[in-house]
Amino acid sequence: MSRVIRSSAFTLAFGYVALGIVALVLFAAPLWYAWRVTINDGRTELLQEDTQRLTAVFRHDGAPGLIAFIDTRVGMQIAGERILLLADASGKPLAGNLPAWPAGVPLHDGTYTVPMALAGQLTDVVVVRSTLPGDFHLLVGRDLARFKPLEARFWYGLAGAVGILSLVGVLGGLHFRRTLMFRVQGIGQTVTAIMQGDLGHRLEIKSSGDELDTLSSTINHLLDQIEQLIHGIRNVSNTIAHDLRTPLAELRSRLEVLALTQPAPAETFAEIDASVADVDRVIRIFNALLRLAEIDAGMRRSGFVQVDATLVVAEVVDFYQPATELKGISLSFRHAGAVPVAGDPVLLAQAVGNLIDNALKYVSPSGSIVVEVAHRDADTVEISVADSGPGISDAEKPRVVERFYRGSASNGTPGIGLGLTLVEAVARLHSGALELVDNHPGLRAVIVIG
Amino acid sequence: MKVLLVEDNERVAGFVVKGLQEAGHTVDHADNGREGMLLAASEPYDVIVMDRMLPGQVDGLAIISALRSTGVRTPILILSALSDVDERIRGLQSGGDDYLTKPFAFGELLARLDALVRRAQVNPTETSLLVGDLHMDLLSRKVVRGNRAIVLQPREFKLLEYLMRHADQVVTRTMLIENVWEYHFDPQTNVIDVHISKLRQRIDVDFERPLLRTVRNAGYMLTANE
């Protein structure tokens, strides 16, 4: 039971029932008030008119005339409906339907509500008392009991309405709760299944498109993203395991052979140097992965400042210039003045550096690399590195940005397969993208910053 | 020079202590933050090597801040497994003078410690540098070797200035990338070597004795000594 009370559907139903009752009472109260006032006023008016008419008869025909008139009236009317009494100065009844002058009526003329025994029952009666010339006393009144059943019916009606409202509310609440519980339990079961590791589950969506459906479809989107991320992580862990194992395996066998064969010192030191190089390769992979994680987590966005993309790229080009000259490759830089962007200058420099590094690896001597900073449109800036190398086939383009993927042209070149991944991550951090297009011949890598 | 090493990992500490002693330096080792702090505040050291993650959840940066607030001006190199750029910035803001990520090559550590000690001794307001017969005027930005004026690009000038300020010391490629170009990444190609050989062409070719030497497995050294 306490679960029923705690359930939000029940609270909601209870709240609506209470609200309905309050509304009903607020509606009935003025009605009741208006009814009471109208009836009371109308009745008093009627009694006063009656009194005036009787007074007029008295003036015209004197006491005997009035007595005859009252007798006729009393004889005609239904018993108990109206009270008429004419008494002399001593209070002795002369005519009317009361056996004696009632005790509770005040001495002065006026309208009063007094308790009176009528047909053996004590009821409230409204009376108008007036004194006629010659010290006659006239009492005109009306029994309120006649309205009692009406009043009771009003209250019964109101109570009935409250009862029906409560019943319908509670039943509606229970039904609402049942439906809601059913669907919430469904969501709960699915989510539990997902928590236990089966990411394939999705929440059921009814065609009605109600609020729960909206919530469910939002959760489904969330699940899609989580599944994608987890898939990515699994993928990355596999490739990391593979790409770290290779240099570690080399290192291990190198050291093992060294311990086993115990060669001459000169050869031993050469092997130790080679081992250090293996370790350095592992460290480089680690550093690149950590930098990627740092960028992917968006942490570097706090380091964004207003920078001139042209200046940042010019410095990188300057940095690589001697290395390209040495290889006989021409490295040129095209730009059209300052291009301010919000970004991280260190990461942008590294991204452009990676692209030039890549180009340097694949372009043959006497080839060329062209770096360019330009506005694509009013809000978009592109930084491109175009080379005259072998390029990347369309089939491979989407794959080269994957972690550890190395293109088919990379055979024999040094590298860990994270360069373009990092460029792509930097572009994404800057709300942009990395585009790889054909340079006919060669590759044109474009960092688009939105 | 006299070095204080604050490092809780015994093997790393042993390796650093041994290496520094072999290079002819005196080393005190503290394996926790409290002892390190006491030693740093009471003994005159030339340089302090501070690990970041110390026993009892102590962050080396807190110790550095405390030392700096008590007026200890000894140069400090922070050793850390945290490689994020933001962590590096935090390290330098707390009062550290250099930041080296674990794992590191011993040559890199030694070169950086030499550079830190040298920086603390050098008068920052000097207007000219001299190594052998190579003279650099920092105000007019002119370089002369012997009687011949040498024309340098701005970046070449900066590179030579850094090498001259650290004359007779090993300067690693990473130190050059960080201090001359202010980059924090490893170019995959031998970019630094090419810059050095270009500089060598300008200052050493046609002279009997070369000043700019390559130190195998470590980096470069500008020196007039034999």
Image (cartoon, rainbow, N blue to C red):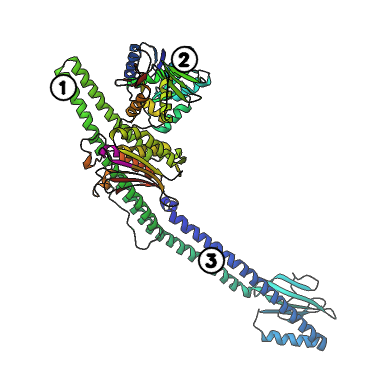
Residue farthest to the front, as pictured = B147
Question: Can residue B56 be seen in this snapshot?
Answer: no
Parent chain of label 1: A
Instruction: Please tell me the numbered disc located at residue A257.
Output: 1
Residue A161 vertical placement versus B98 (above, below) = below
Name the side, left or right, on which A149 lies relative to A390.
right
Q: What percent of the width, then of the height, locates residue A92? A: 78, 78
Q: Residue at x 47, y 57 (%)?
A: A12
- C-alpha separation, residue under disc 3 versus residue under disc 1: 98 Å
Name the side, left or right, on which A55 lies relative to A179.
right
Q: What percent of the width, then of the height, locates residue A327? A: 28, 34
Identify which residue, A385 or A29, lies in the foreground. Answer: A385
Q: Amino acid at mark 2?
A: Leu
Q: Amino acid at mark 1?
A: Val
Q: Residue at x 50, y 25 (%)?
A: B140
Parent chain of label 3: A
Secondary structure under the numbered disc 3 in the rendered image:
helix
Q: Residue at x 77, y 83 (%)?
A: A54
Crowd around label 2: few <14 · some 14–19 · many ≥20 (10 Å): few
Labels 1 and 2 positioned on one and the same chain: no
Instruction: Please tell me the numbered disc located at residue A159.
Output: 3
Please give the range of residues in magenta. Answer: A358-369
Q: What percent of the width, then of the height, locates residue A175? A: 40, 61
Residue A344 vertical placement versus A219 (above, below) = above
Q: Earlier in the sequence, mark 3 or mark 1?
A: 3
Crowd around label 3: few <14 · some 14–19 · many ≥20 (10 Å): few
Please name which of the two marks, 3 or 2, marks the residue nearer to the observer: 2
User: On the image, numbered disc 2 is attached to which residue?
Assistant: B38
Please name which of the two marks, 3 or 1, marks the residue nearer to the observer: 1
